[in-house]
Image (cartoon, rainbow, N blue to C red):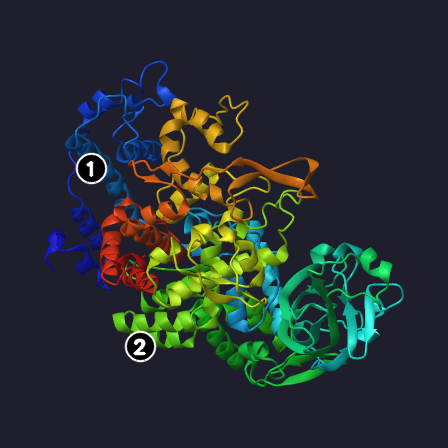
Amino acid sequence: MSGPSRSVDTVMSSSRFSTAALALVLFGAVQAVGQMPRAFFSQHCEKCHSGAKPKGKFDITKLSADFSDASNREHWQRVLEQIQSGDMPPEDKPRPSEQDANTAMKWIRGEVDAIELARRAKEGRVVLRRLNRAEYANTMRDLLGVEVDLADLLPPDTSTNGFDNNAELLHTSSHLLRNYLDAADRVLDEAIASKPKPWILNKRFDIKDERTVKPNGSVYRHVPDGVAIFAAWESANIRVTMWNFRSHVRGRYRFRISAYAIQNEGKPVTYRVTAGTLKEVTEERLVGYFSVPQDKPTVIEFTEQLEPENRIRILAEGLPATPPQVQQVGVENYKGPGLVVQWVDIEGPLLESWPPPSHRALFGDLKQERVERERYEVVSSQPLADAERLLTDFARRAFRRPVSSQEIQPFLARVRSALKNGRSFEQAMRLGFKGILVSPDFLFLRERGPRLSDFELASRLSYFLWSSMPDEELLKLATANQLHEPEVLRGQLERLLRDPKSRSFTENFTGQWLKLRAIDDTLPDRTLYPEYDDILKTAMLKETKLFFDEVLSQDLPLTNFVHSEFTFLNERLARHYRIPGVEGMDMRKVTLPAGSHRGGLLTMGSILKVTANGTTTSPIIRGSWVLERILGTPPPKPPPDVEAIEPDIRGATTIREQLAKHRNVESCASCHKKIDPPGFALESFDVIGGWRTHYRATGEPRIIDGRRRRYWDGPAVDPGDVTPDGRRFENIDGYKQLLIENKDQLARNLAEKLLAYGTGAAPTSTDDTQIEKIISRVHARNFGFKSLIHEVVQSDLFQTK
């Protein structure tokens, strides 16, 4: 070993290298930064940022060279951002030479890096991380094979750097620990088969027998093979509620619904299915949307997890008639489109075996005996030996690593004490299992570092791609100390991505990176946007997630996230995008026609919906989203004294005119030069992602083209602008082409986002060299998205604490 001159890569590859030695090498890798370049700050900063009334209430002369002070360090980082972006000194002030600016930035970076490396030498880059709510629920599912709703016990986690699995914010309180105790009880209640095997329902329900679809003066017509529905007004209770069915126990049920369209000029009709207690709107959840052809009975099959006392409901969608219109001519004489529902087959709960796998995951093949008429308990002829064996196996899986006999003793002691006090074997074992489920080794991802062990790597990889615990194959490879081998790790990454559990990666990563979780934060104004509904919203979300999966699975260049020649559509979304030739509710891959202005994430309805409120669009919100989520260059925070400035915008009629006045305010101008261009480029899309050439205006209803309209075309949209470096674009198509030119920055941003999500800690400037190595390697692989994920997982940043 040659000491500090050794490369960081070489040192990090040694799994036995000590934390202290690692810190020494890392410090050796940081070039000496020398003294503070006081002349630079005096000449270019102090004139405005010092004295009795410094601009922005920021006095640079009050900053010291002590970067161990967090507040002081944060202010210096803000200075670095301003110099690096070119926003400071202002354009109308003398500009420093490139060499002087680089010297100042190098000094700040060096001081910040030194402090960060010192912290990492003590605790690593990633601090102790608790499982977040989604990871906890998924881990319980995979550990015990049960799906239990724990939302009321586990509050939503705080998000930072765009993700809710950031280790530094996943705090633990006494209240949360009490809730973990309750959650463990709830899960064990569900997992342990203490009741007799439930009876299995397997029955066909004839829709004619449902009391809510009687034909007397209504919109329902009884036909020979079912019930035809001719209106879709949910507010008028036009729906088929399966009152003759209710789930008798919690479990997964299989449904088969036979239906077809009628009198619809050969076109399909869509219906949706909901489930729940159906007593209140909040107790009804969407199962899915389905489309059936005309005059051809079609069976739709799905399974759904139900709680006790749940029912399902079938609702027709998009039928043009109102109930009064149908009733006016009489349901038997009505000639418009409708939906015929014939029957519903229901089977459940679906059981693999009894006792179920969840029970055997705890007690193996130990027998049960009846202790009461409706209750059974597990029994053992050698309770202490069985307890130690079962606890050891359960703890190994729960802790995601081998466990020693010594580690099991505290849990075994609880069992022994309970048995001594007269508890039954099963009751005593519940205490042991519960202790494991509230242990820090279960609730936290413990990483000792500096290099992750194979077991720690198995957990980091599985929580990255599955949001759940490693499976037996990963643990087997970790036991053999083979998982860290590059080719083995590549093979496992591919396997994990092929597994259905990788849907959690798509759901959680896109939900946070792209802000899709905010899709319901606002509801579009129904006067301005009457065409928005749940069918459209569902299709929007599916489009984005299917597109993400396609780019990932096919290892397509990540530039597809900016612009692509394809997307995923169904008839409803295609109609919204004005793209012809797509029929039916099934989502499918569609090649985009020339001139569609679609392609890539920026022009997807889901993205355009979450970056607008329910009434208007804002270039500031959309522009900031592009800078932060796509480019990874979020606009700087405003100075502390800058409140929400309200320039005089009276009389302005478009958002461009409003922002033109805003840009004239000195404290706003530098940021708006960066934010506004992408925001203006997206102004061609309205609140719900529809293409527009004019803003929608509303007021007193008007007669337009012979129709009474509550909204009409307002001022024209102007989507052109100039980027901060002087490049002109005329619309979103031109702006996307400019974005694509900077492939390295697109890759850099995604690499940082993947590392933040995959490790629980966002990279810092200290990690720039490692990130550039990732970018260099993916550059050679045509910027493939899956290739980028491979390089992230192979990196030292991913494989070290």
| Count of all numbered marks drawn on residues in the image | 2
From this view, report whether residue 367 is shown above or below residue 434.
below
Local crowd size for mark 1, using a 10 Å CA cut-off: few (<14), some (14–19), many (≥20):
some
The residue labelled by disc 2 is 480
Residue ID at (57%, 52%): 155
The residue labelled by disc 1 is 106
The picture places residue 737, in percent across and down from the top left corner, at 33, 49
Residue ID at (44%, 51%): 597
Quarter of the image with the N terminus is: bottom left
Local crowd size for mark 2, using a 10 Å CA cut-off: few (<14), some (14–19), many (≥20):
few
Can residue 505 be spotted in the picture?
no
- From the viewer's side, name the closer residue of 739 and 322: 322
- From the viewer's side, name the closer residue of 551 and 64: 551
- From the viewer's side, name the closer residue of 455 and 262: 262
The picture places residue 15, in percent across and down from the top left corner, at 24, 64
Quarter of the figure with residue 795: bottom left
- Label 2 or label 1, whichever lies nearer to me, is 1
Quarter of the image with the C terminus is: bottom left
Give the amino acid type for the residue marked by disc 2 in the picture.
Answer: Ala
Mark 1 residue element: helix
Question: Is residue 323 found left or right of 83 in the rendered image?
Answer: right
Residue ID at (44%, 44%): 625
Quarter of the figure with residue 721: top left
**Label 2 – label 1 distance at C-alpha:** 44 Å
Give the amino acid type for the residue marked by disc 1 in the picture.
Answer: Lys
N-terminal label among 2 and 1: 1
